[in-house]
Amino acid sequence: ALITLRQLLDHAAEHGYGVPAFNINNMEQGLSIMEAAKACDAPVIIQASRGARQYANDIMLAKMIEALAEIYPGIPLCMHQDHGNNEATCLGAIKHGFTSVMMDGSLEGDGKTPASYEYNVDITKRVADMAHWVGASVEGELGVLGSLETGKGEAEDGHGAEGELSRDQLLTDPDQAADFVSKTKVDALAIACGTSHGAYKFTQKPTGETLAMSVIEKIHAKLPDTHLVMHGSSSVPQYLQDLINENGGAMPQTYGVPVEEIERGIKMGVRKVNIDTDNRMAMTGTFRRIAKENPAEFDPRKFLKPAMAEMTKLCKDRFERFGTAGNA
Ligand code: G3H
Ligand code: 13P
Ligand code: ZN
């Protein structure tokens, strides 16, 4: 059944577990996630970016979510807009059946320029008011995602802040976080702690300097009742880098957010953990493997079926390690 982010994360907080929020763009990803959730008896957050909505079409996404809820009736399912950039994006998602939206006011509407605190409070509060009128939940973001190693935003894969960022911008300030939540009334707060989107987060295994989990602890101390969200939480596991590179890929060696760090975060109030890149790598690595093993193959299902199995395996692992399993 479809439920809101607020309902789902309140349960997670009460029982001390975290919930992965997996991105989807197509039917195969949706089915892979739901299959894992069913196997683990886990509640689910499925999210669509603006890019996903453009790729799949809003009506296709809306019907797909309806279908997934019908195919898996026992699984609580929250449908969430990932990184909404203005009121229209967020309200458009709600109109198409999303039960939750992220208003990411950490960047201006162009998605590239770090926003002022006042801009962020103002637009996030406006979206939260409107969403709450119609029973949808809202996630806000305070702090800009980007690398503490280089001070760079994420321009590399085409979204995120451009140019050099200061350590202050890259780490959420705990006092400001408390003010932000009290002014905007968001249901969940995304924080910045040195993670970034995509595969290239860290050039070596992160340390407390480059992945500042201590910030989360400080925010949680100020805001014990706020559900915290970690973006850029793919672990970019070595076995998936190897799967891609051993089958004709050429991804430079890279490091993601270790799953142990996320487990620690969950103990410190992280409730929603955003994962897209790991699932992309699971699917693409499998496409490459099949293409290499059987160059004569031309039926897409012969690629997609095993790719779905690889994605389901990854989702199951996260449901188990985040404590989501058994909570549907
Ligand atoms: O925001 C980051 C997610 O991984 C979605 O990425 O905008 O390429 O769909 P996307
Ligand atoms: P990854 O790129 O680490 O999977 O992060 C996804 C994300 O934060 C979506 O909002
Ligand atoms: Zn994100």
Image (cartoon, rainbow, N blue to C red):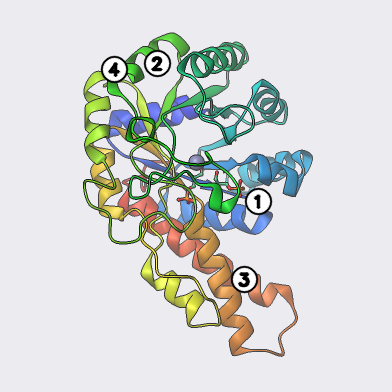
Q: Can residue 75 be seen in this view?
A: no
Q: How far apart are marks 4 and 1 (CA)?
A: 36 Å
Residue 181, which numbered label? Answer: 2
Q: How far apart are marks 1 and 3 (CA)?
A: 16 Å
Name the kind of residue labelled 3 in the image: Lys
Residue labelled 1 has its Cβ within 8 Å of some atom of ligand 1:
yes
Which of pointers 4 and 3 lies earlier in the amino acid sequence?
Answer: 4
Secondary element at tag 3: helix
Residue density around tag 4, few if under 14, some if 14–19, many if 20 or more, within 10 Å: few
Which of pointers 1 and 3 lies earlier in the amino acid sequence?
Answer: 1
Residue density around tag 1, few if under 14, some if 14–19, many if 20 or more, within 10 Å: some
Looking at the picture, tell me which residue is in the foreground, 142 or 267.
142
Residue 175, which numbered label? Answer: 4
Q: Quadrant location of residue 228?
A: top left
Q: Name the residue under label 1.
A: 25
Name the kind of residue labelled 4 in the image: Asp
Residue 289: x and y in percent read: 56, 81
Which of pointers 1 and 2 lies earlier in the amino acid sequence?
Answer: 1
Q: In which quarter of the image is the C terminus?
A: top left
- Residue at horizontal 36 percent and vertical 27 percent from the top: 227
Secondary element at tag 1: loop
Q: Can residue 180 be seen in this view?
A: yes
Contact check, label 2 and label 4, Cβ < 8 Å: no
Q: Which of marks 1 and 2 is in front?
A: 2
- Residue at horizontal 67 percent and vertical 26 percent from the top: 94
Q: In which quarter of the image is the N terminus?
A: top right
Name the kind of residue labelled 1 in the image: Asn
- Is residue 288 depicted above or below 193 in this figure? below
Q: Name the residue under label 3.
A: 305
Q: Nearer the viewer, mark 4 or mark 1?
A: 4
Residue 322, which numbered label? Answer: none
Q: Which of marks 3 and 2 is in front?
A: 2
